[in-house]
Each structure stands twice: as structure tokens, then as C-alpha cells.
Image (cartoon, helix red, strand yellow):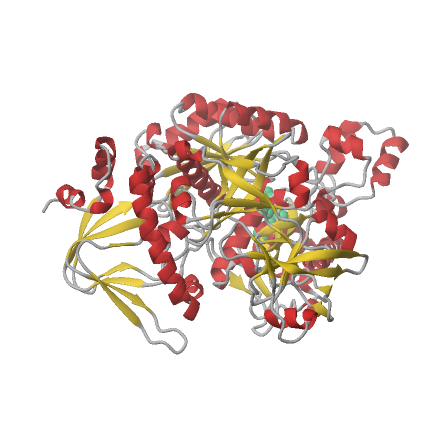
Amino acid sequence: MGLSTFLKSLDIFADLSDREWFILDENAQGIEYAPDAAIIKRGEIGRFLWIIQEGEVKVILPPSGSAGEITILLKTGSLFGEMSIMTGEPAIADVVAATTCRLIKIPRETLSKLIAGNPKTLGKFARLITERMLSNARISAQHDHQRSAYRLNEDPYDLNFSSASEPLKILVLNSGSSSLKYSLFDTIRNLTLIEGAIEKIGSGDAAHHIRTPQIKHKDAQPDVMTMNEAFDVMIRTLTNPEFTAIDRLSDLNVVGHRVVHGGGQFSNAVVINENIMASIRSASSMAPLHNPYNLAGIERMQLLLPAVPQVAVFDTAFHQTMPSHAYTYALPHEVCERELIRRYGFHGTNHEYMALRASTWLKRPLGELKMISCHLGNGASLCAIDHGRSIDTSMGMTPLEGLIMGTRPGDVDPGAIIHLMKNASRNIEDMDRMLNRESGLKGISGKNDMREILAGAEQGDVRCTRAISAFCYRTRKYIGAYVAALGGLDVLIFTAGIGANSAEIRAGICQGLDLFGIRLSHDRNLPGVEQGGVLDISVPDAKVRILVIPADEERMIARKTLHALCRVRTIEETRMLRSKPVPISVSAHHVHLSQPDFERLFGQGKTMTPRSDLSQPNQFACQETVNLIGPKGKVNRVRILGPSRKESQVEISRTEEFQLGIDAPVRESGDLAGTPGITIEGEAGRIELEKGVICAKRHIHMPPEDALGFGLRNRDVVRVGVRGERELIFGDVVIRIDPNFKLDMHIDTDEANAAEISVGASGVIDSIQHRCYM
Ligand code: ADP
């Protein structure tokens, strides 16, 4: 039977329209497998739905706990792979051909197109997925398959583009005032086809460095005087048959642009349209040396490739999760509000890459790690990363704050600047030059290149010695501060020119940090690491892993570009369903208790007394309430929600944090490692929780049917528009999918007040902000 005829015979596709059949026919692919051939490897992230046309396959769940290996045989007509597509999590089983077999492979994107506009097909898939989710939940409850599958996944955060199911050529551009850097990625081969840098444009001394997997060379290009000329050189190079990158410019599928400043508006990469261009333009006043050139690069590419999507990837985006106590300057409030004066942070793309790369290498989920990333190059910054979120970074409103850098001083008493301006009547240009070009390592030692400074110190130059100790001391001081900000540390990362290459500087920084569990092994602290590699330089039994990871902003920009494109496509494909409203429930503070804790508070043998049902099936508010007691104050009569849980947990709002005197992190329910404790008072006693107080992340409960309709996967993060008294868009809303859930968004009282939301309000999913790749 031919592929089309076979697909037509399946009930699951019986309701497709002619247009949908055409899409399916175009994209489904038939493949033969010999007996024992591997089809899906445990740990892989699903990109395809598979259907058995002929033969049989074995699904093999590994031994776990006391249970042995489980093998399930699937026969002709069966589907598999749909779970991994739904959850975005790694496959928990190996799938192997049991006999010679013929399989049909359908890309995830094709499936969402078929489902998006076809309610009957959507319903059929939803039923199938619900059944499998429930049976998987039964299996997973007994064995920790999901966690062990994670450890097998080579690329859980998609750093090697494993999520791409169609071939894409992504051009990454970084256009500055006098340089143009570019890289061309091929997502299927996970390869940089070509990378180049045209430097010193307009100086009469411009040069073009080119590197391909085979060739590395440098061309003098003294005639390149303008940015447009540099673009022409780049395009001629990309399409030059000698480099075998692309045949013609239109072979590019998407262009990703590095944009330095996104202001407070962008928390992820975005596909560029006119509004986005206007926002980048308005942030230009905060980055006059960067944004205008980034914009010029975007405009040039729009002109050359009007039909190709362009994506902006912001240096500031990763730090948008910083809490207000970290980004606020203690300057007059009105001035800060009016002139957008706050800390934004930079190097975000590389700091995020560090977090993902370290987590992949350690084979530990991002969501259980506290990390400090030290980006030490010409520009330098530290970032404190709690469970994947930037909670503080050393650069501020501009890249001048924080560490000592090549030519920038980092932290300086603002009074010193006023004094300098008053005393020798230096004007703004003088100060700008001093702070951006004449300070930092160069100011102290006369040199800005760390290699020269190290060589100078070796020869007894005391100014070089002082520059090195001041650099290391400032960095060490920030590490100490960030251990305090994070409340602990699992991973310390060194990256960029100095961080990735200088063993001596790393040793200087780590000195005396044993008290935090930071113990550097002098044998392992070797000079360099190859691109794409990771070096662990901590002593084996140290509490904190110290890793050296070369910077790779280009790869991260390519990955973010790819994901921004996929997010927009998903939203476009599901536009019809997207208008379905999401009901909103305002959850006031509440407490979940374990049964033993409940008995300690209310008396031995006592159980929870249901008072009213909650919107989610089987969940209820209890008659019983407790009082919360923090170091500063008390919150009385906080409702307990049932049924009992494995671990007790207290969810409060930001306002109550202040009332109690507790600084609780924003976390997903159940993610309690490293959270503060609290005293809880019940009728019959008190308990001291050692941990468990969180500010719950906004979230939407969703059954699989809605998730398929919206094109969303478990733990994706979306923006939701709310039509209350005040129109508002909530970002950072996490999707949670479970067959037992009813569609419902949960926000806390502070958030509801901000949008002036009353009972019966609803929201609309506006866009996908972040996709979960684990
Ligand atoms: P940028 O911020 O311009 O991207 P880089 O990340 O390339 O900067 O870092 C440049 C810095 O790294 C320079 O100070 C350079 O001296 C330093 N560096 C590069 N290699 C070494 C090395 N082997 N030892 C010490 N410093 C190094």
C-alpha cells in the first residue's frame, strides 16, 4: 500500500480537509528499518510523530528501582513519539525495530498545522495523548524514568539545534561602529559554514578575517570605508563558490542580529517588525555607541532580503528576570521612572549560554542549580543565576558598572566623577573618554591587554602587578556578594578572553574562597579549552564545580533566532484557537502541608477538612487556617489547600514578603531547594519549616486538548493579555499540562490588583515568550 493510501486508512486522519491532506502528503516520509535498528534513543527530544505502516517495533523502558526492563510491542497502525512532542521532554524509552519494518515519520510542525485548524483531529489526538499521559504517569510514579532520561539527553537545551526538524541556514550578524562580524550556521549539520569579521572599517586599514571548516585567511580591505561596502564584501564572500557556504543570498532562511540594548521591553529574542524597530530606536539613547549601528545592520539586511525574517537578540534580555531590589538605583524615584534609569545588565546572551552549557555538561537540570558566570574579556561582568534565571549582574544601566575592565573602571564613587568634572573643568566628552577608554586595566597599568599585563608583571612592573591584583580582588568580591545573593553556590564558570584562557587570573580570583566550597585544583587549572569544550578545574570532592567554558555568543544568537522563528510560526498557525479565552483565578496566599506537618499543627490523627472545591479537579480549600510568622511580622488566617502533599510549601505575594520580612524567590510550585523557611502556627502547635516559602510563578493549568490547540508544550512560558479595568500583558506565565487539569490561569493578589481584575476575568495568550527545551 502506498504511503498516502495507508495514511487515509487511519481513523486519526479521517477528518482532514483537502488542503490538510496536501500538507501531510508533502511532509510525511516513509522509511525502512532492519530488525534491531534504533528508531528513537532514550533521552532524545521528540521532533516527529511516527506511524507503523508495516512490521513491529519494541518500546523498551529500562530497569528502574526494583522493576526490571519493560518491553512493549507495537503493531502495524500504531503511533508513537507523540508524548515527547507534547511535553518537549526527552523520550523515556528506546524504540527499536522488532522486525523489518516500514515507518512513516511526520515532523512536529506538520502535525501542529493539521491540528490547529481541525477540531475533530485535535480531539482525537487529545484523547490519545491523555490516555498515554495517564498511563505514563502511572509508570513514572513507580520509577524515575523522566529524570534518568534527562541524563541521557546529549542536548537537552537545544544548543546543537537538535529541535530543528527542517534544514535552516541562519546568518548571525553583529554590526558595530567600525566592524561587521558574521557567522553562517547550518542547523542540520550543526556546523558553522563560514564566519568572518571585517574590522577597522573606514580607517584605510580595514581587514577581513575569514574562517571555514577548511580555510582560515585574512584579506587586507583598505578600500572598505563605509558599512554598506562592508556588507557588500560580506555578501560576496558568503556566495563565493570557493567557500561553499551558500549559492545565492536567498538561500538564507533567517538572519539573527545582535542588539545591545533592549531597554526594559524585551525578555527574549523577537522577530523584527516596524514596532520592534521603533522600540530598538527608542533604546538607542541608552546605548549610543551600539544600537544605532545594530539598527543600520538590520535595515541593510531588510533591504537586501525583504522576504527573509530578521530576528533581534538582545544583550539585556536575559537579565529582565532581575528582581526590583537588584535593578533599582537609590536615586529619586520620579527621575528614574521618567528617564528609565535602572540597572539593565549586558552580556546576557553569553551568560545564558554559560548556564545552559554548564547544565548540559554536568547532566543536571538547570532548575536545580545556583551558578555564577564570570564573563572576563575586554568588557567584563558577573551574573548570578538562580535555577536558570538571572537574579543579578554587575553591569548596570550602561556597561560601565561593576568589574574592572580593559579600559573601563567598573564601580567608582560617583562623587569622584563630580569632583573630576569640577576640578579641572573637564566636560562630558572628557569624562566619557576617560571612563570608556582610559580607565580600567589600562588606567592602572598603562596597558589594556591582559597578556601584556601578565608579561609586564613577570618582569617586575609594579603597576601591572597592581592591575592584576585589583582585577582579581574586585572579581572575588563580587563572587562573595553573589554567593550571598544566591544563598549558596553549585557552579562557578569562567568565560571570555581572560576567563577562558588565563589559568593565572582564575587562580588569583579563587584564592581564599574555600569557605564557600570553591576549591581550585592547580593541576587541572590548565591554560586553554577548545571551542565547544568544557574544563572542570575544581578539586574532585569540592562542593562547587569550577568550569571553564569558551564564550560562543554567535551559536547562542543562532539558537535564539531559530527559536524566535518557531515561536512566531506556532502562534501564527494556531491564531484561530488563540482567541479562546483563558479564565483567571486569583489565588491569595496559601499553604500546602504534608500530613505529618498537618498533624503537628492540628493534633495527632487529624486530617484536612474540605471547605470548598477549587477550580482544579480534586483540589480543595480547607476549613483549617494557619498563621505565618516571619522575622519581621505575622500574616494571620492563611488558608490550607488540600489534599496533603509530600513536602510543605508556603506561597505568598511580594507585599506579604515585606510584611513577614522574608525574601522569597520566584519559583514553580514544588521547586523548593534553597528557599527560605518560616514558622507556621496552628491550633495545636507550631512548626519551623526549614525551607518552602516561595513567590509562585504565574502559571496556566492546561489539559492536553488545549495545549495541542494552542501549540504549547509543558513548561513553555507565554505572555497573556488581560482585559481588566486596565489593559495589561502578563509576561513569564508558565504552562503546566496535565490530563487532570482544567484550563485556568493563576495569579496572586498583587498581580490581580495591578490589572484591576475582578471575578470572572479572562486573558488571551498573546505570544510564546520562551520555549522549554527541558
Ligand atoms: P571582547 O570583550 O573584546 O570580546 P575577549 O573576550 O576577546 O574580549 O577578551 C579579550 C581579553 O582576553 C584581552 O584582555 C586579552 O588579553 C585576554 N586574553 C586572551 N587570551 C589570553 C591569555 N591566554 N591569557 C591572558 N589573557 C588573555
- Where is 90 relative to 433, above or below? below
**Residue extending farthest top:** 303
Residue 286 image position (x, y, % from top left)? 67, 31
Q: Which picture quadrant has residue 19?
A: top left
Residue under the point 83% across and 40% down = 414
Decide which of 85, 397 is in the foreground and name it.
85
Decide which of 299, 330 is in the foreground and name it.
330
Q: Which picture quadrant has residue 667?
A: bottom right
Decide which of 102, 638 is in the foreground and name it.
638
The answer to whether residue 626 shows anywhere in this view is yes
Residue 740 placement, left or right of 605: left
- Where is 697 relative to 144, above or below? above
**Residue extending farthest left:** 1
- Where is 47 relative to 223, above or below? below
Residue 334 image position (x, y, % from top left)? 79, 31
Residue 499 image position (x, y, % from top left)? 60, 54
Q: How many labels were placed on the picture?
A: 0
Residue 125 placement, left or right of 557: left
Residue 759 placement, left or right of 157: right
The answer to whether residue 661 shows anywhere in this view is no
Residue 9 image position (x, y, % from top left)? 15, 45
Residue under the point 65% across and 28% down = 288
Residue 710 placement, left or right of 245: right
Residue under the point 41% across and 52% down = 87
**Residue extending farthest bottom:** 66
